[in-house]
Image (spheres, coloured by chain):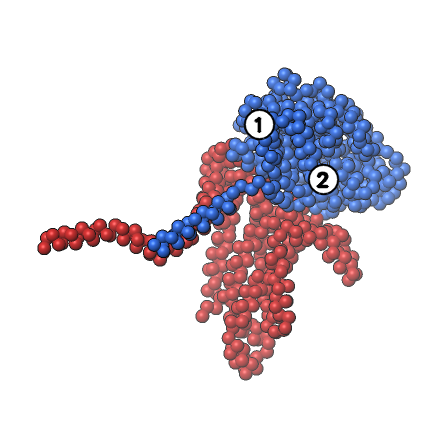
Amino acid sequence: MKKIISGILCTVLMFTLVITGCSSTSSPSNSTSGSSAAASDSSTADSGNGQKIRVSWWGSQTRHEKTISVLDLYKSKNPDISFEMEYLSGPDYNTKLATQAATSQLPDLFQTDYGWISQYTQKGLIADLQKFVDDGTIDFTNVNKNVVATGQSGGKQYAVPLGINTTSMFYDPEVFKKAGIDKLDHAWTWQDYDKILTEVYKKTNISALPLYYHIPEALAEIIVRQQGYKLFNEDGTSLGFTDPAVIKPMFQRVLDLTKAGVYVSPDIWSTSNTTEDNGLVLGTASTSYGGSNQLISYIKAAGRNLDITAVPAEGTKTGSFVKPSMMFSINEKSSDDIKAKSAGIINFFINDEEAAKILLDERGVPVSTAIREIVKGLSDDDSKKVFEYVEYIEKNQGPADGWAPANSSEVYSVLADLYMQVAFQKITPEDAASSFIEQANEILAKNAK
Amino acid sequence: MDNMSATFYESKSGASEKSKIRSFFQNDNVVGYVFISPWLLGFFAFTIIPILASLFLSFTSYDLLSAPKITGLDNYIKMFTNDSKFWKSLNVTLIYVVTAVPLRLIFALAIAMIFTYRTRMEGLYRAIYYLPSLVGGSVAIAVLWKRMFGKDGILNAILSIFGVDSSINWIGNPKTSLLTLIILFVWQFGSPMLIFLAGLKQIPTSLYEAANVDGAKSYQKFFRITLPMLTPIIFFNLVMQTITAFTIFTQSFVISNGTGAPLDSLLLYSLYLYRKAFIFFDMSYGCALAWVLLLVVGITTAVLFATKKLWVYDD
């Protein structure tokens, strides 16, 4: 009898513990990312009585707050919808999204990036939004067609850009003034670049940071476009050019300028990964690179005025082009009703005036020209610099390149390696150029299935 | 007579069913298994089955977004014939292991020897020296390390006090970056040190007394008595630390920002595995890499065991 009672008690105790341990928490759970200070959170919003739409995005704490406000605003206008939100910092987001894709649990509405969305569209995981554009749910009347095209692939509209930015160079106007230069011209050429930076170094002994030293693919894209090519070919099975001489100038310049001292030495920039570590921010360098939407955070971190201009042109060809800072896409597997509602939410993000007043330019320059005017009116001088620059590129660019194909991240990593090796003088520009073409084509050949 | 025997057999077989189950559960081994069944469940679900799954996946091509396709030995062949980063990461890891482990053990033993001079603050010192082992594997320390050895870091500041003009970015220079990782590993000598301390206390003092009578000097005592008596402990520490060193990940991930930069000088094997699996989404290749690591660690351990007879003093 005793044994039976104690047996029952033990089982009950065990089950209680198991149930407590396994119960799903409704409080936010924090997971920290490795290096950056951006908080990542995931929370379940109050479960309303209507349709539940799962939304997810990545970003900094500022973005989380703004996005939640906009979603709450939408909810107040459409009370039959409730949101389940998931938000994380950048690298964690990619891993989580891929895991969700593997278990067929993708959110209904999620942020995507120009650089890796093709992996998902190729597996049929993302819905075609064309019908929502056609029936007016998503309104592109105020959006430049080049910008709309950035969300398309193979004739289908897989994503809607939420903001645009472009490649740019930041510089310290005080340092440049000492060399007699007031403001850099957005239309400057590579010859101007070499000359001016060398002047600045001679007069002030301050070096410049090499353009795009951690993500040289952005620079490669521009240089290749300036010569009339594209970085990848149509179906992403090889590079868009075959001659090493096309890409060699990029390596040659980093070697020459590093040897001359005009560029900062690689053992300094090879481990500088955060804004706080950056040479321009710390005042030890005269220039740095960044997406146009990063100017504000650089200025804040540096605590002094910084200016923005274009990556130099080759003669009259800019090479730069506006890219979506990020896009929203809809899960192909969601129900038609949820898809339609999500399309409405996307439209709200890009076209609603009240939403725009909350989001401002946190996700980049607004895609709708009408909204842009409103936000410009609310912006400070630094933001206005960014607007002015991005609109310059928008007006002067050639048609945008298509999305990066699958396996492009491996190609980029090969390029970053070679770029660093040239800077460390471990390999010649000729060898780097031909090695890049060889390795990249080998990687991209995997896409030919 | 027949009746009695029939009943006897009947009751015996009738009772034996029940008592079989009873005695099964009263068997000590079975009771043991029942008690650890929660852990066993977890072990199977979260350890054994994923390990077997990764073995299976290593023979496929799997990118997490679509179902795995069986490709046989492709991953392994590619690894050994067409992957220069694999060899580079193996090279970096081997240099790391061969340098960091002996250094760590030497420091551990040296400090443990100092503890033989008993002081009142002994407990405090032990805690201080053990502390790095506790916190060392963390991200925070790795970030701190990055700052310390950076161009404007403390190390350069200290060196300049001694008049050595150094503005090297120890982390950014591919020649010196691995050294900073090695120092980080050696700094956490606390745990092998405690084991050595325990081992030192077990050496019978009668041996030392006999040596004193024979007029032995302190270094003779160390090399003729202490070291030989300690060899089983040294062996244990060597094997455990080597296995640990092969799998170091956090420090190299944080210090190189996940890339193994500069120039792959910090690309430890597990970092390479992580990049292949989680940044390039080549999960199957990552699995194959993991099993090759198991093989490498297994072979290294086997070799260490084979040398045991030569230098470990087992009494």
* Label 2 chain ID: A
- Quadrant in which residue B165 is drawn: bottom right
Q: Secondary structure at mark 2?
A: loop
Along the line of sight, the residue nearer the viewer: B148 or A202: B148
Label 1, on which residue? Answer: A51
Q: Is residue A86 visible?
A: yes
Query: Which of the image's four quarters has the C terminus of chain B?
Result: bottom left
Q: Chain of mark 1?
A: A
Which residue type does callout 1 highlight? Gln
| Relative image position of residue B119 (x, y in whole percent) | 63, 73
* Residues at circles 1 and 2 in contact by the CB criterion of under 8 Å: no
Amino acid tagged 2: Tyr
**Marks 1, 2 in one chain:** yes
Q: Taking A243 as reference, is A289 left or right?
A: right
Q: Colour of chain B?
A: red
Give the side of residue B153 with respect to residue B18, left or right: right
Whole-angstrom CA distance, mark 1 to mark 2, is 46 Å
Can the viewer see residue A246 in this picture? no
Where does label 2 land, which residue? A213
Give the mark nearer the N terminus: 1 vs 2.
1
Residue found 63% across the figure and 40% down from its top = A41
- Residue located 51% across and 63% down the image: B235
The single residue placed furthest to the top in the displayed view is A135
How dense is the environment of label 2, judged by Cα within 10 Å: few (below 14), some, or many (20 and up)?
many
The residue drawn where x is 63% and y is 45% is A32
Can you give x and y, in whole percent of width and height, for residue A107 in the image? 58, 31
Q: Name the residue furthest left.
A: B1
Apparent side of residue B93 relative to residue A378 in the rendered image (left or right): left
Q: Nearer the viewer, residue A19 or A221?
A: A19
Q: If the image is split into quadrants, where does the N terminus of chain B sit?
A: bottom left
**Chain A color in figure:** blue
- Place of residue B314 in the rendered image (x, y in percent of width and height, measured from the top left): 46, 68
